[in-house]
Amino acid sequence: MKHARYVITILSIFFLGTFANAQYTVHKMISVGYTYQNQSFGELGGKLLFLKNDDVIYRLGASALMGSANSQFAIMPKVSADVLLNFEKNVDFYHSYYFLIGAEGTNKYVAPKIGVTLFGILDLAGGYAFPIGDSGINGKELKGLNINFTLNIPTVFIYDMFK
């Protein structure tokens, strides 16, 4: 638990320091996805996208991982922080994809990750999870390869769809 607090503190200081310098536009998104962490988990939550220009984008998220571990249903809270990078200037087509660098943490593990995202909406990322203490979930150890596939749906899109 001590490591998770340390990681969250460092990420908070980084993002708050970055946001203090400039005015950002904030967009809300609903995230739905799949996470593999020695078990398959479905993911449901929300993210905030902080945008000043479209070269560097920041995202913060919170969600719930839900799945079966050793034949028992389990739910874990998850927080994530991502930086989306694309430095191609004045070419709209090349801004359709971004490189993703980030980290996610639950009450059971912390996982740095890298990947790609299409328009910031469809993410494919992978990393390596480091367990927090000796904690697992329902007797299943949660360390090693971490793979994420996530669909981020902007709430503006949902609002406009039902107008």
Image: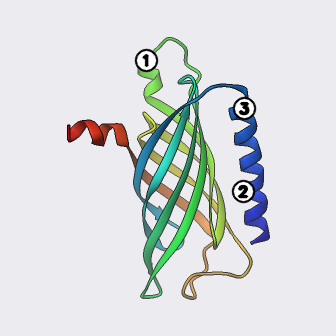
Circles 1 and 2: CB atoms closer than 8 Å? no
Alpha carbon separation for disc pair 1 and 2: 34 Å
Q: Residue 119's x, y, as percent?
A: 42, 33
Q: Which mark is residue 20?
A: 3
Q: Is residue 141 left or right of residue 72?
A: right
User: Measured along the vertical axis of the image, is residue 148 above or below residue 114?
Assistant: below
Q: Nearer the viewer, residue 73 or 99?
A: 73
Identity, as a three-letter code, of the amino acid under mark 2 = Ile
On-image quarter of the N terminus: bottom right
Q: Is residue 63 left or right of residue 33?
A: right
On-image quarter of the C terminus: top left
* Extreme residue in the front direction: 163
Disc 2: which residue: 8
User: Measured along the vertical axis of the image, is residue 93 above or below residue 33?
Assistant: above
Q: Disc 1 on helix, strand or loop? A: loop
Q: Is residue 152 left or right of residue 116?
A: left
Q: Residue 132's x, y, as percent?
A: 71, 73
Instruction: Give residue 37's quadrant in the image.
Output: bottom right
Identity, as a three-letter code, of the amino acid under mark 1 = Asp
What is the crowding at mark 3: few (fewer than 14 residues within 10 Å), some, or many (at least 20)?
A: few
Residue at 47% from the left image edge and 48% from the top image edge: 124
Instruction: Give residue 84's quadrant in the image.
Output: top right
Alpha carbon separation for disc pair 2 and 3: 18 Å
